[in-house]
Amino acid sequence: MITTEAVERSFYDKVLAATPDGEQLRVCLECGNCSGICPFGYLMTYPPSRLIAMIRANRFNKVLETDTVWMCVSCYACTAVCPSKIPLTFGLMTSVKEELLLAGNVPAELQTALANSQRYGNPQGESPRKRADWAKDVKPDIAIMAQAKKQVDVLWFVGDYPSYHPRVLSTTKALAKVLNALGVDFGILGPDESSDGDSQRLSGERGLFEMLAEKNGKAFGKYQFNKIITTDPHAYNAIKNEYPQLGISYPVQHFTEYLVERLEQLKPMLKREVKAKVTYHDPCYLGRANGIFDQPRALLEAIPGVELVEMAHNHANSLCCGGGGGGMWLDGFQWEKAHARMSEWRIQEAVKSGANILAVACPYETPRFEDAVKSLNIGGQLIVKDIAELLAESIG
Amino acid sequence: MNIVALFKLVPDLVEELEIDQNGTALNTDFLRLIINEFDDHAIEQAILLKERSGARVSVLGPDIEGADDVLYTAASKGADQVIKLTGDFQGKANNHAMARAVASTLKELQADLILTGVQANTDLDGSMGALLAEYLDMPYVGYVSGVNTVDGKVVARKEYPGGLVAEMEIKLPAVLGIQAAEQPPRYVAVSKVRQAMKTATIEERPLAEADLSGGSTIHRMFKPEAGTRAEMIEGSADEVAARLVGIFKEIGVL
């Protein structure tokens, strides 16, 4: 049991060491901004600022007896508003989850996703051999690196949900269509690809993240390509910011970044009008965590007929869909605690903005937001589409 | 008290099963093995008993691909001894043969309580627990979903159909077939399993000579064959609904 002062002190040191800016924990002003902006902070026994107070008081054992830290969806809102620039999401919250996980204090549904990731390389527990099955009926044929045996310009890291989730497959196929229309020389890893591991890391499973990163690192090393693009902002974040610390360094872009660089080539292809008011939801790991706000909007504005409107929370102030940091695998647990869904809050904002289409750029979001549209019983008022889908529709 | 949890590895159904050319066994080219789910519960129950009332837990399984992972995971959960049984398991091991061979190892381990999954999807000739109990001349209770130790005995909760549960007191040594542990098998962080790989030692013990008598022989293995009685109704939702109503009227339920 973790009860002694020495162990508590070692946790303090661990958080300090967990991120390059860990030392910043010492300069917390206790302003409370983090706990105030946290979407589920009101449900946490110890939201970030109180956590820091507990750690400073060597009372961390009290924290280990609670389970409300699992309400954290690693949305980065606390980190973004911290005046002392404390790495709250990556450092503090993730380290606390790690301690809870090691102490066996983990909600069962999260355990399943982690066990699946360990065994099958994807949190859904799908067959790793079928990771590229979605590409079977896509024309022209998509190069699967192990079979294509050639160098490609772009390695497309497809991701877990884009490879398997029935709803998200439509985004995947749409992106394939856009890449093909642009004549991009690309390939995918197929069964060689494992989960990027970022959400597993942010739910406290550092060892699993490293295992998955090592597998992907090995797969990257087998093939020749110039850069990686990702469907998923979480994969983008992992490959860009975390993999290099494990010695896995490749140039990487989110697909919205990549496509914006080719906007002049893309624009003449966007022939079909998408006559709609569109509002864009900034995914946490594209926007707040990595500063990509303009590229997705530029793509949307390039589509003829699209009128872009903003929701009340936009850019760095965007609301989370609730899927990050393990939230994707904690729906039941979080519902029991909150009797509210972040995705529903966001959908209500989207409706208020007057938009007919909610555009997204993260594979967690289409299913989460579509479910929220259904549970709010407002079908017909708002359609949820990935940017890749809207671009593919406009290409026609 | 010495608790021994036994496991076997079964085909992982996440991958599609294929039948080999002879038509009597699974094609093992792409077959991936996974711990039998009920055995995973047996290990969890053993660890829970150790945590609650103290015991020495040994985990035991055949030396085939995947066994090391199961054993290191068991060690990281708190198993004191992890053992793999070496020998030729390819193709021929039936439950009768396994039970007879494992029985001698269990005697060496002086097991007071033997826990194993109540069933496995590869059981063709009876369940392991009952066979073991026979060869060890011990009492057996199956479909157990909770165990407590009381004064050198165990009290097991046995599930019956229709939602009935019985509590049974059983003298030790005994064999229990576990349906479910009191809590789902715990998740162990990868870092802990990796640590166990450095600190725990997997013991190897040769399995006694296999006596295959009593097992069953597979004459033909095949995928479920489609029947001819199903009628697929094609068309739009309205057409399908109209046809369904028609059928319901024809067979007299409407």
Image (tube, coloured by chain):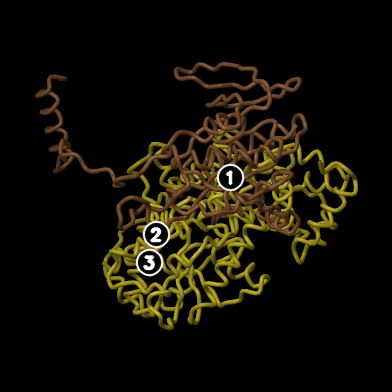
Chain colours: A yellow, B brown
Q: Mark 3 or 2 closer to N-term?
A: 2
| Real-space Cα separation, disc 3 to disc 2, in angstroms | 19 Å
Q: Which of B132 and B34 is in front in this view?
A: B132
Q: Do labels 3 and 1 share a chain?
A: yes
Kind of residue at disc 1:
Leu
- Secondary structure of the residue carrying tag 3 is helix
Residue with the mark numbered 3:
A175
Instruction: Name the chain letter of the residue that bears numbered label 3.
Output: A
Query: In the image, B75: left or right of A297?
Result: right
Residue with the mark numbered 1:
A110
Instruction: Name the chain letter of the residue that bears numbered label 2.
Output: A
Residue B71 at x, y percent in the picture: 64, 50
Residue A93 makes an appearance in the image: yes
| Real-space Cα separation, disc 2 to disc 1, in angstroms | 23 Å
Residue A124 at x, y percent in the picture: 48, 50
Residue B105 at x, y percent in the picture: 65, 42
Residue A259's disc is none
Asked if the residue under mark 1 is in contact with the one under mark 2, i.e. CB atoms within 8 Å, the reply is no
Residue density around tag 3, few if under 14, some if 14–19, many if 20 or more, within 10 Å: many
Q: Which of B225 and B3 is in front in this view?
A: B3
The number of discs equals 3
Which residue sits at x=59%, y=29%? Answer: B176
Location of residue A237 by image quarter: bottom right
Kind of residue at disc 2:
Lys
Q: In this view, does A110 lie above or below A119?
A: above
| Real-space Cα separation, disc 3 to disc 1, in angstroms | 30 Å
- Secondary structure of the residue carrying tag 1 is helix
Location of residue A278 by image quarter: bottom left
Kind of residue at disc 3:
Leu
Residue with the mark numbered 2:
A130
Residue density around tag 1, few if under 14, some if 14–19, many if 20 or more, within 10 Å: many
